[in-house]
Image (spheres, grey):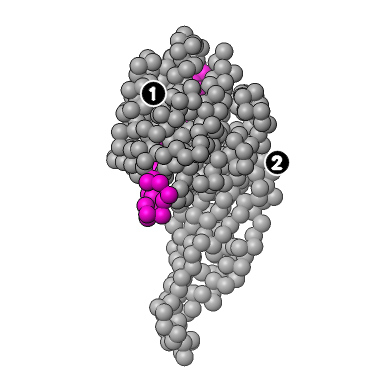
Amino acid sequence: MKNNIINLAQDLIRRPSISPDDQGCQQMIAERLAKLGFTIEWMNFGETTNLWAKHGSNKPIVAFAGHTDVVPTGDESQWQYPPFSAEIVDDLLYGRGAADMKGSLASMIVAAEEYVKANPDHSGTIAFLITSDEEAAAKDGTTKVVDALMARGENIDYCMVGEPSSSQKLGDIVKNGRRGSITGNLYIKGIQGHVAYPHLADNPVHKAAGFLQELTTYQWDQGNEFFPPTSLQIANIHAGTGSNNVIPGELYVQFNLRYCTEVTDEVIKTKVAEMLEKYNLNYHIEWNLSGKPFLTKPNKLVKAVVESLEQIAGISPKLDTGGGTSDARFIALMGGEVVELGPLNATIHKVNECVNISHLATLGEVYKQMLVNLLD
């Protein structure tokens, strides 16, 4: 299994698939899966390549999900090895996407190949949902595929997302949920004027001071056993022309909330509106909801993954819901169970991104054992 995983991971890394340009990665994957009898369906939207592949036709549907796109490399001269050369040095596979997430994609594919070869008439359905639009806009990728599948009554029961979840040791963290993320772009109107004649102007910064104090100190919730409390951070604030003798005519404030399941995006919007009205502000606000929070409780999927890690890797993972967002937020809308498990995240999006090749081999065995636990 190990050599097959490493060879495939190298083949994938050598294709410079910067979002949303897949560079033929999914075609290569589709050809491998088709040889095993997977049905291949292309669900492309815009410039994004999306693959939906299935083996079997019964319930439950156990899906592997991931992305072939990577973030830009930055200055390639800063890399110890060319970012798309997939060099292996001292058991480390270097390259953009090695950890996030072409390495785990290779482990998933080889795990499914070995399981299907050994169990050609397995129960349930094994599926792959792969996109080339996760690292950038995430508008034409997994979210569009999920919408299309649900529209025709096709839902995933159990889903493993190969995001790099591990922290210190392979398998020490399994993500069984994520916080929601919502951003407010707030424009508070005033009247521009000369600082020497404040009675002829209306300074929006002064008027908003009380609101900003309340916004940044408000306790949204206490969190719960699975999530920390909701947090709000101001990400950007701007007013004025740059001149010290001009009262600004507008104040722009951008803030983001990472929120748990104790509140909803509608509650957040309503409360912020109440605060703005309380301070009698003339405002316009634009909201951008990146994803709602989701939680997979320790039921069948979590149990299958935990037991696989204990058996194959000899580690009992911690269930965690921290970190940013992933495509799991879209898949969770289908109502099934979703978790994330992948290699160490220490080098993701960095110069000299790399992954331990032994970790990829172990991941492959864990993914394969997960299929055994869920389908046998």
Q: Position of residue 11 (x, y in %)?
A: 36, 32
Between residue 29 and residue 157, name the one nearer to us.
Answer: 29
Contact flag, marks 1 and 2 (Cβ < 8 Å): no
- Residues in magenta? 59-83
Quadrant (top left, top right, bottom left, bottom right) of the C terminus: top right
Task: Identify the residue position indicated by label 1 in the image.
Answer: 53
Q: Check residue 93 for magenta coloring.
A: no
Classified by dominant secondary structure, the portion drawn in magenta counts as loop
Which quadrant of the structure image shows residue 68?
top left
Of circles 1 and 2, the one toward us is 1
Q: Position of residue 303 (x, y in %)?
A: 64, 25
Is residue 331 visible to us here? no
Task: Identify the residue position indicated by label 2 in the image.
Answer: 225
- Residue type at mark 2: give it: Glu
Q: Earlier in the sequence, mark 1 or mark 2?
A: 1
Q: Residues within 10 Å of mark 1 (few under 14, many from 20)?
A: many
Q: Is residue 305 left or right of residue 13?
A: right
Q: Position of residue 358 (x, y in %)?
A: 54, 31
Picture disc at residue 157: none
Q: Position of residue 139 (x, y in %)?
A: 38, 43
Secondary structure of residue under mark 1: strand
Q: Is residue 97 left or right of residue 304?
A: left
Q: Residue at x 62, y 28 (%)?
A: 313
Q: Is residue 69 left or right of residue 324?
A: left
The residue furthest bottom is: 196
Q: Residue at x 35, y 16 (%)?
A: 35
- Residue 301, relative to residue 213: is it above or below? above
Which quadrant of the structure image shows residue 17?
top left
Q: Residue at x 44, y 41 (%)?
A: 94
